[in-house]
Image (cartoon, rainbow, N blue to C red):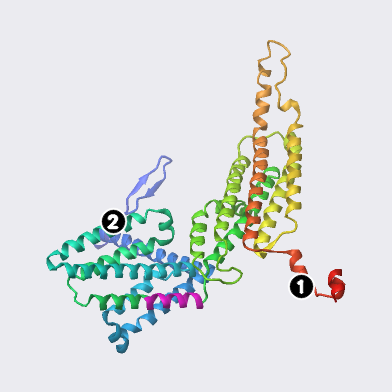
Amino acid sequence: MAQQKELSSVTEWRIKMADGSSEALAQQTGLACRAWLALKGLIMGLILKVCDFFKNAWDLGQNDPRKVIHCLKVGMALTVVSLFYYMRPLYEGMGGNAMWAVMTVVVVFENTVGATICKCLNRICGTFIAGSLAIGIHWIVSQSGKEFEPFINGISVFLLASAVSFSRFIPSVKKRFDYGAMIFILTFSLVTVSGYRVDKLLEMANNRVYTIIIGTALCIMITMIICPIWAGEELYMLITRNMDKLAYSLDGCVGEYFNDSGSSSDDDKESDKKLLGYKCVLTSKATEEAMANFARWEPAHGRFNFRHPWKQYLKVGASMRACAYCIDALDGCVNSENEVPELIKKHMSSIALKVSSESSRVIKDLARSMKTMKKSSNIDYLVGEMSNAVLELQEDLKSLPTLFINPQPLQGADCPEKKNTGAVALMDIMPLVTLASLLIEITTRIEGMVNAVEKLAEMGVYKSVADEKNQNQPVSKSNVPDEHKQEV
């Protein structure tokens, strides 16, 4: 009996296959086992997500350590301003309003100096103007009588909050003073409403203004002294990086079209990423506008004075995007499924590569001029070479064999296979003609980039190479003009 029970406990079910063999059926697990496996899978999935999160955070901090420094600066500012709440002498001087300094640090501390100063000044001005108006209305209410106070306060809050909210839709106000308008509404509403129950309204308003000034001053000092990140410098570096990416994308797209090897190595994948660098130019408009807006609030720093023409950088970026749109269309032409006959492709390859090379040289020279903040002495020569290459490209387009442009005359009435000979040939060369026309359009837009950068050089007072050589050259008697010699 014991043996039979043991055999029955280990009995397994088998199924007979078509070829005569048999396979064992897996036993179904119990409900508890399945629940444990599901819970185990859930826990392991959560652990993997947490590990991926910390890995991505580590990579982010390693790629840009300034983000880590910014977080440390925020922690330092909050720790210092918290002393007003922890230390009794400071707390007795400010009271519960010391918490407003902590709130100010939290809401105004930004990554760049310009953004922090913009928010700080907006908060101070919005708080001061709103507090002054609220106190003035409180005085009017106190002279009118207690029974009219709720009505006057309600009407004033309604009118001013509505007017300031509408002003936030005005583009010029929204761009620079949107945060200040929001703080105005918040402060005016709080002071006006709380003034109905608080007796010492003026003292409360003064304490809040003082704590906000303390918080904003601390934020400005820390963000400007400890590893400052200037919005103007970020904009400047973004423009120059995008110029290099634009030049590489232009050169690489045309080179890939005429020298397609079809390989897929790691180097080619990395090269493909660089070829798509023009997309960074297309998506950088919002970042450029934000950086230019914050840069106007920054004091003079490094090579940039207080009245540096930051708006001109936006025009340079706009001209770069106009060129990037053409490169985007050029990339679509390169990846077209229509194949061009090799004869025509070889006929146009040398001049097309020359146009792209000369155009990229102009863009690289513009980027070099902006990096060094010096006027280029070669830009006129490079633009001339680019224009000459475009003329050669146009001549080559005119000199394409007529066999691939005009339809061939029919040799007989019963030649249906030859009726579409010219049309097919024309469709075959359409991608190449499109590429050539896009190259010509790109050179035109590059000239717009040249004009924008030259205007920036004039407004930003870029030094020319000749002026720098004259400054570095020692003055000798041989260099003195004849008029000065006669005076001596």
Residue that badge 2 annotates: 162
Is 143 situated left or right of 297 in this image?
left
Query: Residue 74: which quarter of the image?
Result: bottom left
Is 98 situated left or right of 18 in this image?
left
The secondary element bearing badge 1 is classed as helix
Q: Residue furthest top?
A: 413
Span highlighted in magenta in the image: 213-225
Q: Predominant secondary structure in magenta?
A: helix
Could you tell me if the residues under marks 1 and 2 are in contact, i.e. CB atoms within 8 Å?
Answer: no
Q: Residue furthest front?
A: 487
Residue 206 image point, x, y percent: 30, 77
The vertical placement of 32 against 253, above or below, is below
Q: Nearer the viewer, residue 6 or 399?
A: 399
Q: Nearer the viewer, residue 395 or 33?
A: 395
The secondary element bearing badge 2 is classed as helix
Q: CA distance from mark 1 to mark 2?
A: 61 Å
The vertical placement of 400 against 140, above or below, is above
Q: Nearer the viewer, residue 70 or 166?
A: 166
The vertical placement of 395 against 112, above or below, is above
Magenta segment: does it hold 429?
A: no
The three-letter amino acid code for the residue at tag 2 is: Ser
Mark 2, Cα crowd under 10 Å, few <14 / some 14-19 / many 20+, is few
The answer, for residue 30, to whether it is visible in the render is no
Residue 223 image point, x, y percent: 47, 74
Residue that badge 1 annotates: 472
Q: Residue furthest left?
A: 147
The three-letter amino acid code for the residue at tag 1 is: Asn
Compare marks 1 and 2 and give the one earlier in the sequence. 2
Query: Residue 209: which quarter of the image?
Result: bottom left
